Amino acid sequence: MTITLDDVAQEIGIPVMGKAVYGSTPMDIEEASKLIFESLNLLMSEIVKEFDKTGSTVPVSYLRFLVDVDHIRAYGWGAVALAHLYRQLGIATRAKCKQISGCLTLLEVEFDPCRAVRDRRPLEEFTFFKGCLCINNISEPYMSDRDFRQLGHVQIIPGTPIQPQRDVRRNQSATSYRVDYPGSVQLVEQWVDSVLSSRTRGDPVCRPSEAVLEYLGWFRRNSHMIVQNPQNKKLVHMASTSSDL
């Protein structure tokens, strides 16, 4: 089970699809100061104080997407919220990380919460998007073919997962965490071209447990079925293998 774009749309109600909040061009102090001055109408002395602060901060670069109030809704803020949460969940797995940020309300979502009211809250096409959700210079993979059972469709063996680039850093420290995905991966802004076809989705089902015949075998081979002590790995593996037979 994971948090889907449908969960974001139904629970938060902000636009999910739209222009990508994406850009990797860094800003220097002068550019950031000018952006703050134009956006928030702050005095230079106040701007200096803002840059001197530590703790919970918001990157100044986000202001570039908020300057034009009339076009704020043109961006896919729902996809941004989900991308940020995905990244924070990854960071939270680090041994030295003691907190998590993001829209944590989404972690309280029930399994298919709108199933009984789909006539009023339909499952939108963008839910079946497969590609990368972007937020500034961060991108996180969204692979809906791994969650068909959660979306009310027969679960198939999913396709090849989106792989990160080789420069991956998953150290114990949260500050050094870095996972980048290739720029060629389709961004959420072009979601129409990256939605899985109705043939790939299969038929709607009544029970979430319904899957193609080959799925359970694939799941056993590719999942961590048992949390185990590495010293007893061989014994546990033998027991699970014999039970499969």
Image (tube, rainbow, N blue to C red):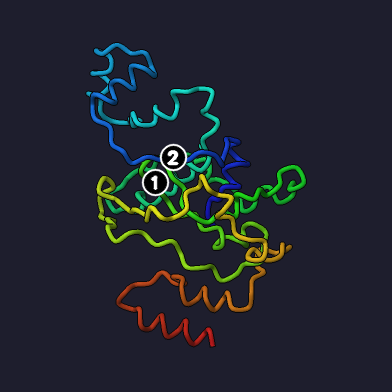
Mark 2 belongs to which amino acid?
Answer: Gly
* Picture quarter with the N terminus: bottom right
Q: Residue at left 30%, top 47%?
A: 97
Give the percent coordinates (x, y) of residue 101: 40, 40
Q: Residue at left 29%, top 50%?
A: 177
Viewer-nearest residue: 15 or 119: 15
Q: Residue at left 44%, top 23%?
A: 67
15 vs 208: above or below: above
Give the percent coordinates (x, y) of residue 45: 24, 12
Mark sitting earlier along the chain (1/2): 1
Give the label on residue 88, or none: 1
Give the percent coordinates (x, y) of residue 102: 44, 40
Q: Are marks 1 and 2 in contact (CB under 8 Å)?
A: yes
116 vs 80: above or below: below
Mark 1 belongs to which amino acid?
Answer: Gln
154 vs 142: above or below: below
